[in-house]
Amino acid sequence: MPAFTIGIDLGGTNLRIAAIDQDGRELQAISTLTEVSRGREYVIADITASTALLREKFARSHKFLGVGIGLPGIIDVESGTLHSAANLPGWQAYNVRDDLAQRLDSAVFLDNDANCAALGEKWLGAGSHVDDLCMITLGTGVGGGFVFNGKPWHGVLGMAGEIGHMTVIPEGRPCLCGNRGCLEQYASATAIRRAALEAADSGESPCLAAARAQDSALTARTVYACAQAGDPAAMRIFAVAGSALGIALGNLINAFNLPLYVIGGGVSRAWNQFAPAMFEQLRTRSIVFRAGEEQKRTHRATEVVPAMLQDRAGLLGAARLPVILRPGRCCSMAV
Ligand SMILES: [Zn+2]
């Protein structure tokens, strides 16, 4: 009998729940908005109902292996509790794992959204050929996750992977984390948008000024369109982001010497604009990256690649959690 799990990708805006089979095929998905404003109990009841529906439907033809959930915020994976979640007010100190397990009468496994995305890319995306990888997600903020030996790495406080708060410019822009010059202040969609607004206001970019006149929100996607049209200011904004990313990545490559670093999140779609500056920094600053380039005929070089699964990575990674984390599992997923 084939097996399946249920993955839950709970974001501050979107809630996606899907039954996923052992080969990563989506049997059925339920997508809705996370109605955070209606309170935690409403959202949990919504999750419980959809999960129970999917389980009942597919448990007739598949063996059910459990539920995996990815959440934004800092999670104590051992206790199953959310330490903090800026996008989920009222969820702090809540034991989401035990509550869901009780309501569903099922094993529930949880992790943060960045680790789930890294796990999803490891399973079915850019990292399916390696056991160890690092993923950096360039979204509203900058997130990070490590997968070692096929499993997420959490660190002693469950805070491993705070790559967005690595210092790339000492005494640079202040960050909400208390530091200055964090990667997130240069390579997130928020940072790109802020730099674009400054360029539009200063008059140095007619393209960005025109775009702003049409839509005062100015998204990173619009900045990318201006860069693609050859606007020097927009191109420079992505070069700054790529350079900051290259500095952080160079340090990670020197420290870990992993085979693969995956760049995901919405900003990663602007790869052709920021990657040249990123690789320039890697070649300049990282002895390990250079060694990989010099020895790639005989050794595996360091790969830095864009993500493949985009916004499905977190859902697929969450669905993978019950398989890799359940006690007593054997070496194969085919159970
Ligand atoms: Zn920071």
Image: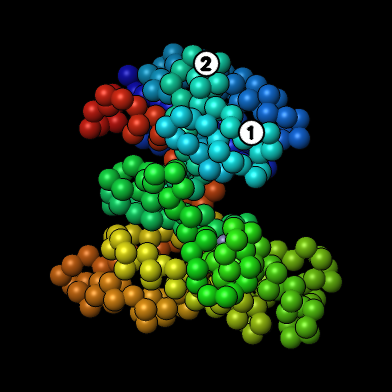
- Residue 84, image x and y in percent? 59, 41
Residue at the right extreme? Answer: 213
Which of 305 and 160 lies nearest the eye of the viewer? 160
Q: Which mark is residue 126?
A: none
Which of 213 and 261 lies nearest the eye of the viewer? 261
Q: Residue tagged by mark 1? A: 91
**Mark in front: 2 vs 1:** 1
Can you say whether 2 is above or below 318 in the image? above
Residue 57 visible in rendering: no
The N terminus: image quadrant: top left
Image point (60%, 81%), residue name: 236
**Label 2 to label 1: alpha-carbon separation:** 17 Å
Residue 40 visible in rendering: yes
Secondary element at image label 2: helix
Q: What is the crowding at mark 1: few (fewer than 14 residues within 10 Å), some, or many (at least 20)? A: many
Can you say whether 189 is above or below 88 in the image? below
Q: Which mark is residue 102?
A: 2
Image point (19%, 74%), residue name: 295
The answer to whether mark 2 and mark 1 are in CB contact below 8 A is no
Image point (70%, 63%), residue name: 219
Which quadrant of the figure shows ligand 1? bottom right
155 sits left or right of 130 in the view:
right
Secondary element at image label 1: loop
- Residue 90, image x and y in percent? 68, 33
- Residue 134, image x and y in percent? 38, 56
The C terminus: image quadrant: top left
Can you say whether 298 is above or below 109 in the image? below
Quadrant of res 40: top right
- Residue 64, image x and y in percent? 41, 20
Q: Amino acid at mark 1?
A: Trp
Count every numbered label the image shows and give the total.
2
Q: Amino acid at mark 2?
A: Gln
